[in-house]
Image (cartoon, grey):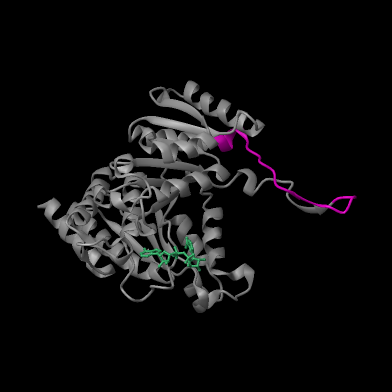
Amino acid sequence: MADAINLLVLPGDGIGDEAIAQVRRIIDWVGNQRGINFNVEEDLVGGCAIDAHGTSLTDDCMDKALAADAVLLGAVGGPKWDNVPFDIRPEAGLLRLRKEMELFANLRPAMCFDALVDASSLKPELVSGLDIMIVRELTGGVYFGEPRGITELPDGQRQGVNTQVYTTEEIRRVVRVAFDIAKQRDGKVTSCEKANVMESGILWREETNWVHDNEAEYAEIELSHMYADNAAMQLVRMPKQFDVMVTDNLFGDILSDAAAMLTGSLGMLPSASLGAAVDGGRPKAMYEPVHGSAPDIAGQDLANPIASVLSFAMALRYSFDLGEEADMVEKAIENVLAAGYRTGDIMQPGMTQTGTTGMGDAILAELDKLAA
Ligand code: NAD
């Protein structure tokens, strides 16, 4: 058997626990059926870590995350911790993980399963077969740039300032991530900025072209550029024109949320955040569903575990080079949906409603069929 894959699993709070419990079953299945040695360790993050340790992420857990081949996270937060001091709030643990693992590229797929085309806010023909990947720069740009702040002007008015800053390497490294992903897909990348009105946008475009023109492994990528406002319009007009989109932190925040809603429910949306490869090894990586801890349905076997399962499929594909296994997991989900199984959030008339565990059972049954 090949070397063990070290996976740190952090279920977190609320439905994180329930959804990740189903992922654990899928990890075991992939390990057993495909002869892959997953070494899974579990720890606390978020509110449950505050309860146990007085902090939302212990140093020990942070060290484990840095040493792991990938981290799989559920969700953090809930009303129980709404009034804890700001610096130990549940989200602080999540932010520390992202910061210390230097996760600079956020991957948000927008994939529409045929069985769910009616859940989209767009016409079925516009979203049927949709499969876009948005790569958002996550650690730079206007959310972090200096100077920032609110100051008082001599005339008594107040002035709010944020600064959009990008350097050559910040742009090039996220563009390379987008190009690498495109090589595993249809080979098309659309880079989005506002080069018409922002110098940082001009630099973004020039550096993106530089990587494309100077790094031989990306010569085959079909690169195009689009102003971010036009990209927003095109996403709701004709989303299937895109394969991979790469953009900065601010535009990526907005474009990825818009793309997410093309596919219907929060319970279906996975994500990945990637960092730099260490010593030629695997890039640091964290995989998590887009949704939060959903305290309104927690502990009732109502949560849709598919976003978390799809996050694990992304780990298989992007961290472990197990594309075939990732395809199997995604295919099993597609078949379960086609067979009419639905959790409450994606329920439609005439379908069979199931709970969190029932959805896990159905995915495992489909995996068994696919492996037979
Ligand atoms: P949320 O994503 O938790 O829930 C929004 C709505 O979607 C709720 O009605 C919920 O029931 C539903 N929903 C979400 N995921 C679902 C799933 N898998 N299956 C079925 N229904 C699902 O967002 P919120 O209500 O704004 O936040 C709740 C808590 O989660 C807050 O404490 C917030 O800070 C936290 N949060 C955490 C993360 C994270 O861990 N990455 C992200 C967003 C919010």
Residue 292 occupies which quadrant of the picture? bottom left
Q: Please indicate whether residue 284 sits to the left or right of residue 155 in the image.
A: left
Report whether residue 361 is seen.
Answer: yes
- Residues 8 and 130: in front is 130
Assign ligand 1 to one image quadrant.
Answer: bottom left
- Residues 66 and 250: in front is 250
Percent x, y for residue 157?
Answer: 83, 52
Q: What range is drawn magenta here?
A: 153-172
Report whether residue 274 is seen.
Answer: no
Percent x, y for residue 31?
Answer: 23, 57
Q: Residue at x 41, y 45 (%)?
A: 282
Q: Please indicate whether residue 143 sits to the left or right of residue 12 in the image.
A: right
Percent x, y for residue 21?
Answer: 31, 68
Residue 14 occupies which quadrant of the picture? bottom left
Q: Residue at x 24, y 46 (%)?
A: 327
In this view, 50 is above or below 156: below
